[in-house]
Amino acid sequence: AQTVTQSQPEMSVQEAETVTLSCTYDTSESDYYLFWYKQPPSRQMILVIRQEAYKQQNATENRFSVNFQKAAKSFSLKISDSQLGDAAMYFCAYRSGRTGTASKLTFGTGTRLQVTL
Amino acid sequence: NAGVTQTPKFRVLKTGQSMTLLCAQDMNHEYMYWYRQDPGMGLRLIHYSVGEGTTAKGEVPDGYNVSRLKKQNFLLGLESAAPSQTSVYFCASSYSPLGITDTQYFGPGTRLTVL
């Protein structure tokens, strides 16, 4: 079974600075997808960014980018120019690329990000 | 286009009571999921469905039942609630075209407390 590990329960960053959230995963599969979800105090789960394992290029969405190291099974999220609205819980998630797996997600335990002035 | 909606948003039950959580999506998604979120444990999959009339067990299915009678709805039932089922429940849905990444879209969650 796949596992996702987020070793940083809490992180803090000053406004306008850059922060990196860590995620590692364990899998024997070669075809899979990785995701970062944001959960603000409203509880709504919001997709931040996703990465296909077969793509070597790191995904980028505006101020959010990932560092995907397939051999090391590492998938970190970098938030640049942090804003107060970035304060939230961030979850890393894994999805198998095998057919018949119903696109199920395996989540990490989350990292709570605080943004200070 | 409301996306994924959940009813109710909050509920308090007494041990042994039953209830049904309703999830509805208007995106014509094939797949639907129920997760529970507990402190320090992330989201864990309870049950899922790959299409109308089908359901399957996830990681933590005990104490729950589900039904998918209509494509747009996915019901989660608790027949005899226990305090261990106190949690926040999330529904999600995704499309399933072959060979294309299908992102899961989440509902706003239901906070359930079992006394």
Image: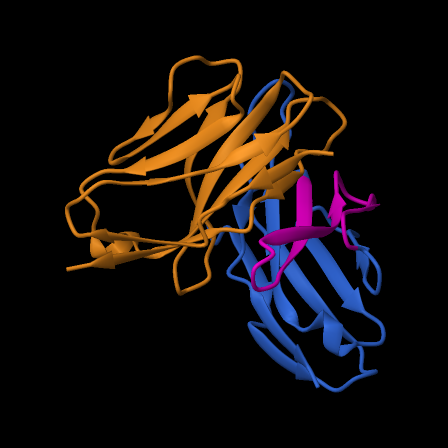
Chain colours: A orange, B blue
User: Residue shown at 46%/25% (left/top)?
Assistant: A51
Residue A3 relative to residue A112: left or right: right
Q: Is residue B53 magenta?
A: yes
Q: Is residue A23 magenta?
A: no
Front-most of residues A114 and B3? A114
Residue A39 occupies quadrant: bottom left
Front-most of residues A86 and B19? A86
Q: Is residue A60 visible?
A: yes
- Residue B6 lies, with reference to residue B26, above or below; the image says below
Residue A28: x and y, percent? 69, 21
Residue A84 occupies quadrant: bottom left
- Residue B106 lies, with reference to residue B13, above or below; the image says above
Residue A112: x and y, percent? 40, 56
User: Residue shown at 47%/14% (left/top)?
Assistant: A55
Name the quadrant of the N terminus of chain A: top right
Q: How many discs appear?
A: 0
Residue B110 occupies quadrant: bottom right
Which residues are the magenta region? B31-60
Residue A41: x and y, percent? 39, 64
User: Residue shown at 74%/78% (left/top)?
Assistant: B83
Q: Is residue B29 visible?
A: no
Front-most of residues A2 and A38? A2
Name the quadrant of the C terminus of chain A: bottom left
- Residue A27 lies, with reference to residue B106, above or below; the image says above
User: Residue shown at 66%/52% (left/top)?
Assistant: B44
Residue A104 relative to residue A116: left or right: right
